[in-house]
Image (spheres, rainbow, N blue to C red):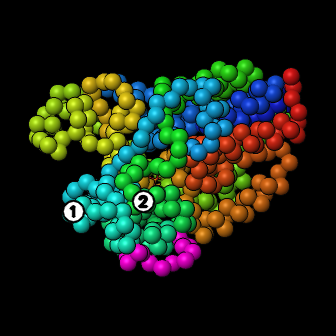
Amino acid sequence: MPSELNTDFLIIGAGFSGLVAAHQLSQAGWKCVVVDRRNHLGGNAYDGYDAAGVLLHHYGPHYFRTNSPRIVEYLSAFTEWREVAYTIKSHVQGRLWSFPINLNTYEELIGRAAESEEFQEWLERNRLPIESPQNSEEVILSQVGHQLYEMFFEGYTMKQWQRHPRELDRSVCGRIPIRTNRDDRYLTENFQALPKAGYTKMLEKMLDASPSVQLFLNMDAAEARAKWNYKYLIFSGAIDDFYQKKFGPLPYRSLRFEPESFTAGQLAERQKLLGENAAPDGFWQTAMQINYPEQNVPWTRIVEIKHATGQQIDATTIVREYPKDWTPDDEPFYPVPTLESQAIYRRYQELATAEQNVTFIGRLATYRYYNMDQVTGMALTASQNLIQRFGTQL
Ligand code: UDP
């Protein structure tokens, strides 16, 4: 039965991409309905307080960063920022290493002080002469050689993707910077900050500033498409779902999160036990994130996000991440960029490009390992194109 409910735009997915598009279209006077199959907005950036009172990123750490002043300016209408120099460590051979690889890592490797020039020469001698790296193994070997690749990348990548780095696009390990100075920040972008009150609050504010937008939770795409008459569809779900997997399923990786909370008393006990290796008061580990590349540990990383949020609270929560293949019971977190999956994606993309009244945005709909700022940029551009095409309703 065709429904009596009408909207201009139906937007599937209330994550960054769907909400940004809805906000922009609403500014142009268009009526939008946004639906999400989960019981909350924000997609995987959704955050909130756990039973211990700790502000957690429910779907793994989301470290906002960007080089785009336009995106900072846009999001700043909905949040203040807390600047954070995201720093992490890697746990290898029973000890912590400075990571991403930088001059400190080299000093830890050779057990004495060194200068940048020495490390550069070491890298020249050890790196493999691969002119245009074709995959994630080559991209790291061409920069640092076998020893550091095997210590920090090979095992982690095998665990995270259940594929060898040589099967993965170069952009996967290529995301990680390698430096010969002492800059040990995990990320390189010039703006690195978290929304002060969290992502959920920021996105709620964006929605509040979108008067002609209605949000419906716990509703999947099929139900929404049957329920509303709409002029145009914006889809931010998985593209193979949109086309009923007619060219076969695209692979996704997922994660299982295992949170563990500690009271102030438990943290004080732990401090006594660990002595000089202990974390500062109120923390369980010495860094916001510790990576575990070795295969004999089943998790890839332990994140204690309180280091980054700066929340003033005695308790803390750490979260261990266990990678797994996506099944219909999981959230799909990562597209898997192999040659094979790219070939399947291109077939879907061809259909997507030919659609007259559907736009595909976001990590899942474009099958790209995009960060939050890139997704925001994509949604801004897509909605501006739509406003150019359809004009405004003001
Ligand atoms: N990676 C690695 N060792 C590390 C950290 C990252 O081999 O210690 C590789 C791994 O393949 C990972 C990719 O680099 O999936 C990207 O890492 P990032 O931390 O950006 O992943 P995300 O936070 O998006 O899961």
- Assess whether residue 307 is covered by the magenta stretch: no
Secondary structure of the residue carrying numbered label 1 = loop
Left or right: 264 in relation to 257: left
Left or right: 388 in relation to 58: right
What percent of the width, then of the height, locates residue 310? 37, 30
Q: Main secondary structure of the magenta part?
A: loop
| Quadrant of the snapshot with the N terminus | top right
Q: How far apart are marks 1 and 2 (CA)?
A: 18 Å
Q: What residue type is labelled 1?
A: Arg
What percent of the width, then of the height, locates residue 248? 65, 62
| Quadrant of the snapshot with the C terminus | top right
* Residue 109 shows in this picture: yes
Left or right: 318 in relation to 166: left
Residue 250 numbered mark, or none:
none
Task: Look at the image and give the residue range highlighted in magenta.
Answer: 124-135
Residue 272 position by quadrant: top left
Left or right: 264 in relation to 149: left
Which residue shows up at 23% across the image and 35% down it?
280
Which residue shows up at 46% across the image and 34% down it?
83
Secondary structure of the residue carrying numbered label 2 = loop
Ligand 1's quadrant is bottom left
Instruction: Give the number of marks.
Output: 2
Q: Which amino acid does label 2 sit on?
A: Arg
Query: In the picture shown, does residue 115 fall above or below 243?
Result: below
- The mark that comes first in sequence, 1 or 2, is 1
Which residue shows up at 43% across the image and 55% down it?
324
Q: Nearer the viewer, residue 213 or 63?
A: 63
Residue 251 position by quadrant: bottom right
The residue under label 1 is 112
